[in-house]
Image (tube, rainbow, N blue to C red):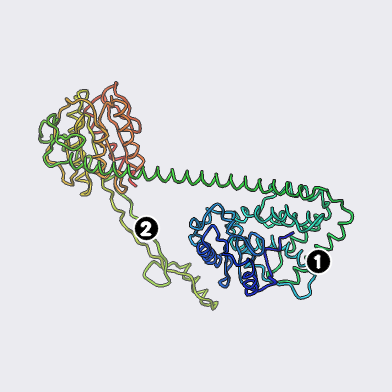
Amino acid sequence: MSAHHHVQSPATTLDDDADLARWDDDGAPPAQPRSSPAAWLRVGAELGDRLVALSGRQDLLVTCRPGTRSGAPAAYFPTRGEVEFDAGLFAPLKPHDIHPRIVGDEQNYPAAWGVFVHEAAHAAHSVWTEPAGANPRVVEAALLLEESRVEGAHLITRPTDRTYLRTSTRTLIMPDIAHPTLQGIEHAAAAAALVLGRRDVGILDAGETRAVAELCERVLGADLLTSLTRIWTAAHQCADDDATTMLTHGQAWCDALDTAAPALPVPANLTDLLSGAVGVAMDSAAATDAADLAAQDAAANAIASRSSAQAKDRAQRADRRRKAAATAKSVFNTRAATVTPDGTPAPSGNPVTGTRRPTAAEKSAAARLSRALRAAAYRERTEERTTSPTPPGRLNMRAALARDAQRAAGSVPTAEPFTHTRRRNSPTPPLRVGIAVDVSGSMRAACAPVASAAWIVARAAALTDPDSLTATIAYDTHLTALTRPTHRAPERVTTFGANGSSHNLGNALDALDHGLELRRPGAGRLLVIVTDAVYTPAETAQAVTRVKQLTTAGCAVLQLTLTAKSRHLPGTTLLHLPEPSSAPVAIAAAATDAIRRTR
């Protein structure tokens, strides 16, 4: 086997090579390489920069050119501090396509990079040197065991390089199998060391190497294969600089082959059999790597698609927030004008008919609701108890006696006999109530009670907490603010009629949501929709989307209906009121429940 060619001990010096090179031709101009030598010099220099991270050494030189002096795809020369690399490994890439200094560029030539990682493993871990007078056959066996040992040692510090070492196995192993320097049983044993040794250090999987394992067991026999496996497994545990132990394993390898070889028949076509079995193993590893790469690409694409979808969703939400802000600004205008969904003034159709003074019953209802909201908003004071070894605080006699006992025993007193209770008032949550009133022709009967209810709720909320806000929007095709978000208690009741057509609940909810901050926690939030919900599918879908967003954010959504023909708007709590006059009571009860559930 030629596996030992990866670690070279040159017989000639650099000066000798230069002198011989002068006489390699008859004086004619030297043949020009297809690629510029300077370009490959750059690639070699950049490989040298990356070799520092791979091997942890800064004293190594990398030469990259077409062909190598050793004849191997790559080789490490310990005495020169040089790694020789065949530029043909990068084929079909040209030098200008190769930029090893850029981390990640190695993904464009994984097999070549795997060979480079293998040589880096030699540079980092092939520290031992053969002593003078060592048996060449034993050294050859030790270097054979070194192939899988250095890769296993490399994986301990750089486990992510496993993928590249797998892709390089065909380049490193197949030439040694197809053109062996060893024959017969030693050829099969070397194949086992190169392939199954890499299996045992985690480079290859057991299933991928099954064909080689079965062939080697058939050729070598189970006992000899077990002995050889034991030898290379022990070599994997050898220290990088322990030449004595490595040569001991090499001697054991030779002894095992010498003992068993005479009794083992050698198949006539052993090289073909080994080449076929190793080819199956390499193809299986390549298929596994391709499947893993496809799975990674699929996962990356899924993540990219999800990220793209999330970015698109964020952009859509931001766009909706901008539109909601614009709608709220146009609806809650100071002129109390009716506007279209895009914020432009509507030419006609303002449902507001005027204002009136509240009745005594409405004032009384607002006062009762204010008291109910205060009761719902009340929070018990929180108590925090702390102990201390000194006053102030209430003396706990048991703890005091324990402290005296600790002091008498000569130990450091840890008992804290004084207890102090600190009480704090919990803040009262404010209230946010939005009311959306359908003013299409079918809702004419609800106008008076809803106008009364809106005033009662706004008045009660303002009297309960100065930070409370309410607002009412009438909607059909257009939007009209009956009451705007304000901290002041309204003095008069706004009256309105219902003669519109079509519906625009989605934009009405956007305006109320933005104007009252119905999605923001920290307040009792309630949205009341007074409608029969006889909408088109598109109108219903827009409204349901907004309702779901509000309920998810913790805002209670109530739908009040007045007739049996009314439909239920999905996501809302439906409350059917046969008597329109009961609307104020229903809204008050819902507001009280919302403030109790404030979070």
Disc 2 residue type (three-letter):
Glu
Element at label 2: strand
Name the foreground residue: 301 vs 437: 301
Q: How many marks?
A: 2
Q: Is residue 174 left or right of residue 116?
A: right
Name the foreground residue: 442 vs 349: 349
Element at label 1: helix
At 79% from the left and 75% from the top, the residue drawn is 133
At 82% from the left and 63% from the top, the residue drawn is 254
Between label 2 and label 1, give the one nearer the viewer.
1
Inter-mark Cα distance, 2 to 1? 81 Å
Residue 535 image position (x, y, % from top left): 28, 26
In this view, the residue farthest toward the top is: 565
Residue 375 image position (x, y, % from top left): 28, 45
In this view, the residue farthest toward the right is: 263
Q: Is residue 199 left or right of residue 463?
A: right
Q: Is residue 46 visible?
A: no
Looking at the image, is mark 2 or mark 1 earlier in the sequence? 1
Q: Is residue 481 above or below residue 166?
A: above
At 48% from the left and 70% from the top, the residue drawn is 415
Q: How crowded is the residue under tag 1: few (<14 C-alpha within 10 Å), some, or many (20+)?
A: some
Q: Is residue 242 above or below residue 517?
A: below
Q: Which residue is mark 1?
A: 251
Residue 497 image position (x, y, % from top left): 15, 28
Disc 1 residue type (three-letter):
Gln
